Amino acid sequence: MVKLRLKRCGRKQQAVYRIVAIDVRSRREGRDLRKVGFYDPIKNQTCLNVPAILYFLEKGAQPTRTVYDILRKAELFKEKERIWS
C-alpha cells in the first residue's frame, strides 16, 4: 500500500518537509516512490505537483492526516471533484 507522507528535510530547528509517495512499510526517511510536493511550516509555503498527487490518489494511495490537511487547504479535493464530475 502506498501513502502520501511527509519526509523531513532541512536543518536542526528549521525543518522543511517533502510530500512523498512512499510504501507503508518504509520508514519516514526511507526511499520514496516519487516526490509530489514541498511544505515549509515556518514560512507557510506549499508547492504541490497536482497531476502526480491526483495520479497516486486515483491508484488508491492514502494521505496521512497532516498531508490530508495540507491538500485540503490547497483546495485539491475541490479540484479533484471538478475533474471527476
Image (cartoon, rainbow, N blue to C red):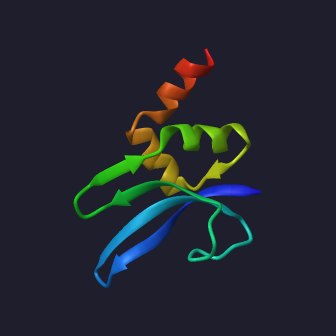
Farthest residue to the top: give it.
85
Q: Quadrant of the C terminus?
A: top right
- Please indicate whether residue 27 sits to the left or right of residue 82 in the image: right
Left or right of 69, for residue 41:
left
Residue at left offset 74%, top offset 71%: 25
Query: What x and y, as percent, mark residue 78?
Result: 48, 26
Please provide percent x and percent y for residue 22.
65, 62
Is 2 drawn above or below residue 52 in the view shown?
A: below
In the current view of this chain or complex, which residue is farthest to the left? 43
- Considering only vertical position in the picture, is 9 above or below 24? below
Residue 39 lies left or right of residue 3; in this view the side is: left
The image position of residue 20, as x and y in percent, is 55, 59
Q: Which residue occupies 42% across, 33% down?
A: 75
Figure disc tally = 0
- Residue at the spot 43% in from the left edge and 46% down from the top edge: 48
Residue 45, position as x, y percentages in the image: 28, 53
Residue that appears at 50% across and 53% down: 67
Quarter of the figure with residue 28: bottom right
Name the image quarter holding the N terminus.
bottom right
